[in-house]
Amino acid sequence: MTLEHPFAQYVRILGKGPNLSRPLTQEEARAAMALVMAGQVEPVQLGAFLCLLRVKTETPEEAAGLAQAIKDTITPPKGITVDVDWASYAGKARRLPYYLLAALALAQAGVSVFMHGAEHHTAGRVYTSEALASLGVKAATSVDEAKAQLARSHFAYMTLEHLSPRLHQIMELKALLGLRSPIHTVARMVNPFNAAFTVNGVTHPPYLTVHQNGSLLLGEQATAAFKGDGGEVERRPEKPCEVWALVAGEPVREEWPALVGGTREKEEHLDLTRLKALWTGAEQDDFADAAIAGTIAIVLRYSGRAGSMAQAESAGRALWDSRDKANIPGAQQG
């Protein structure tokens, strides 16, 4: 008689049918993901597990358990303090990644930002690495390199390919499965460098409660998640923005008003050289300017650097306007 594989129980819990299946507990999700990260599951089991989670949508308990198991496999750098953990997993298709200018402005002001993401999972999008390259900023390819960049310029970015090769392999299964797995959501919640504050942008609003309650279960004290432009951490200035946050470990929901009137059209050509022009002031764009300052405001508000939305809006605008236009944090000279 063939012995049952240790991972089979978790597939059975999720897939036993409409009356007998149930969500995983946080502890079960963590144990299941630990086996996945250790490479101790068969490909057919992993595919079934990911698809079953995807079909029903992961619960906050499942998301927290999966995220914790992933975090258990990543060794953060010692001797460095990170202020903001910034997830970048969507890519931009309709507009340039203005969120990068917001993150770099914060870094220039002394707020250390560690950004991590997955790239090239969807055709026709611009991803963080190539956008940073247009600004002369190199993505880190190791934790030690990220630590050095954070110490030098208060900003570092790593893709999962280098931060967690095993997780990168799992994310790459989209080409085989034909859909994104729940790991695309969970990876955003890992906070691998133990930053004091985490910020996430989502594409679909129903995931906001998963981020807020999952982060609560993970013991996070300061987080923010909102429907961002293209699913990235970027304010849509022409629309109100509802933020689901944790403030001192307590759930908070706040709606921020639109910053500009009118509507924005799709940018037909995503010319990355415009990012540097916007930073230097060589180009002016009211919508982009509002998106950048507004994104900074959200980070300031929920990371405890502004006491109210009004204070955050004012401080975000001042921080962006006072940037050193001649220097981009982390940009290589020459």
Image (cartoon, rainbow, N blue to C red):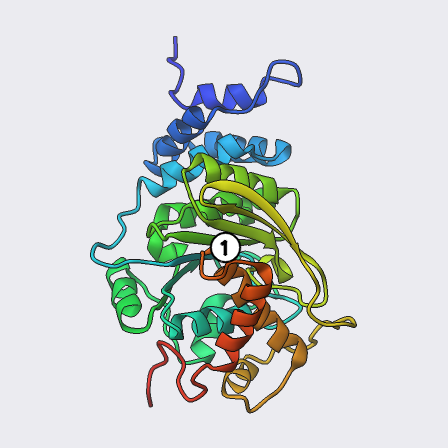
Tell me where residue 94 appears, x and y as whole percent. 67, 68
Tell me where residue 55 appears, x and y as whole percent. 63, 34
Residue at the image point whose x is 41% and y is 81% from the top:
328
Q: In which quarter of the image is residue 290?
A: bottom right
Residue at the image point whose x is 52% and y is 81% from the top:
321
**Residue 100 in view (yes/no):** yes
Q: Quadrant of the C terminus?
A: bottom left
Left/right placement of residue 75 relative to residue 20 reads: left
Most extreme residue toward the left is 79
Residue at the image point whose x is 54% and y is 45% from the top:
176
Residue, disc 1: 302
Vertical placement of residue 19 versus 242, above or below: above
Q: Quadrant of residue 330?
A: bottom left
Towards the viewer: 64 or 250: 250
Left/right placement of residue 230 relative to residue 136 reads: right
Tell me where residue 54 appears, x and y as whole percent. 59, 36
Q: Across the whole image, how many numbered discs are drawn on residues?
A: 1
Q: In which quarter of the image is the N terminus?
A: top left
Tell me where residue 178 appears, x and y as whole percent. 60, 45
Residue at the image point whose x is 50% and y is 30% from the top:
61
Towards the viewer: 307 or 241: 307
Callout 1 amino acid:
Tyr
Most extreme residue toward the right is 262
**Residue 43 in view (yes/no):** no
Mark 1, secondary structure of its residue: helix
Residues packed near mark 1 inside 10 Å, few (<14), some (14 to 19) or many (20 plus): many
Vertical placement of residue 258 versus 275, above or below: above
